Image: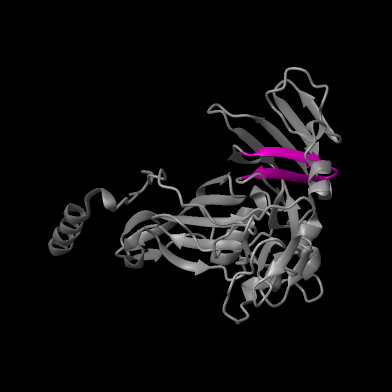
Amino acid sequence: MKRLVVFIGIILLLTGSAMAISITSSTIDNSTGLHNQAGATDTNTGTVAGNVKTAITAVSTKIFCGKSTYGICETDADCVKGGCSGQICQSKNEESEVTTCEWRDCYNYTRKALNCVCITNKCMWNRWTEAQIKSIIKKQNAINVTAKYWDTCPSGCSCTGSTVKCQLANGRIMTVYAGKSGNVIIQIKGENMTTNVTLYKSGEKVYGVFKGNKTKEINMFQEQVRERIRERLNRLLENENISLDENGVYQYKGEKKARLFFIFPVRILVRAEVDAETGEVIKLSKGNWWAFLAKDDSQQVVGASCGTVTPGQNDACCQTKGFDLWNSETQECEFSQ
């Protein structure tokens, strides 16, 4: 037993602050967030940027990796698809880019319901035309918790003081109110998430204006993000925190109980990135390098996946969780396009 104590002491001495162990009731430092994920209309290849120091355990291969040149245009007719696989959205007045002739699944713009259109005089991949975006992004549709006079409260919402309550699909109520640090807090079914994104409501749908002035529909909300992570890990997580970033990606942090060297109670940090529009888990990782030395001690979630229900009831199960249908290939609940 003395040798074990000495061994543990040496590890702690060598690793110092890098080893953020949470013994019993102490907490893990969650200040380091994951970096930005490119959206469907970005010019990169859909990979994660930044100095990410976590060990990645799962990465989505479904991210659209086509390219937008942002060439000058006046109408949608000025924008054309280029590249050997039609993966480039460019102006018809630009020279065609030379690309390799290969097909990659992430070039499939039809699966993402994307179109090569002219938005703010630039050719780019987007789900909507500029006219459709203008019909959504209106002053009267804005969810503005700092408004002094509610003459522009969105349809289907009630606005009182600095609080906005809106009816969403499936009978859900979304409550939005001002946070203490200049952000807004969104609450659905008693669960919170934060964001600095400008939100709009049109009908029963919610949209956000993200980095690069890109408008995206927010199909995924915080309770569904938690559900998705539980499905992947099949474990109950604690101290969960969710925020929606400027790229339309949820940044998720949670903790999972474990026992270091099968003896000492610790908490392993779990991070994830989830696309708010498609619901895809872009990244899922365990942030502690020493996690392989710990035995999972978290509570297993029985029936977390809708794949375990009675055959034929999968879609109904997904709908109770805010999704549309069950995908037997990916073995996950999804939204219909």
Find the magenta span and give its range.
Answer: 197-210
Q: Quadrant of residue 261?
A: bottom left
User: What residue is at 62 percent from the left and 72 percent from the top?
Assistant: 106
Q: Work out which quarter of the rendered image holds the N terminus and state it.
A: bottom left
**Residue found at the very far top of the displayed protein:** 148
Image location (x, y in percent) of residue 97 = 60, 69
Closest to the observer, 301 or 218: 218
Q: Work out which quarter of the rendered image holds the C terminus and state it.
A: bottom right
Closest to the observer, 15 or 282: 282
User: What residue is at 59 percent from the left and 62 percent from the top?
Assistant: 281
Q: Main secondary structure of the magenta part?
A: strand
Task: From the viewer's perspective, tell me whether residue 1 is left or right of residue 52.
Answer: left
Task: From the viewer's perspective, tell me whether residue 54 is left or right of residue 116.
Answer: left
Image location (x, y in percent) of residue 220 = 69, 53
Residue 36 visible in the snapshot: yes
Relative height, residue 196 to residue 113 (above, below): above
Q: Is residue 202 magenta?
A: yes
Closest to the observer, 134 or 268: 134
Q: Quadrant of residue 228?
A: bottom right
Relative height, residue 290 to residue 17 (above, below): below
User: What residue is at 83 percent from the left and 48 percent from the top?
Assistant: 132
Q: Is residue 106 magenta?
A: no
Image location (x, y in percent) of residue 195 = 60, 39
Residue 114 visible in the snapshot: no
User: What residue is at 38 percent from the left and 46 percent from the top?
Assistant: 28
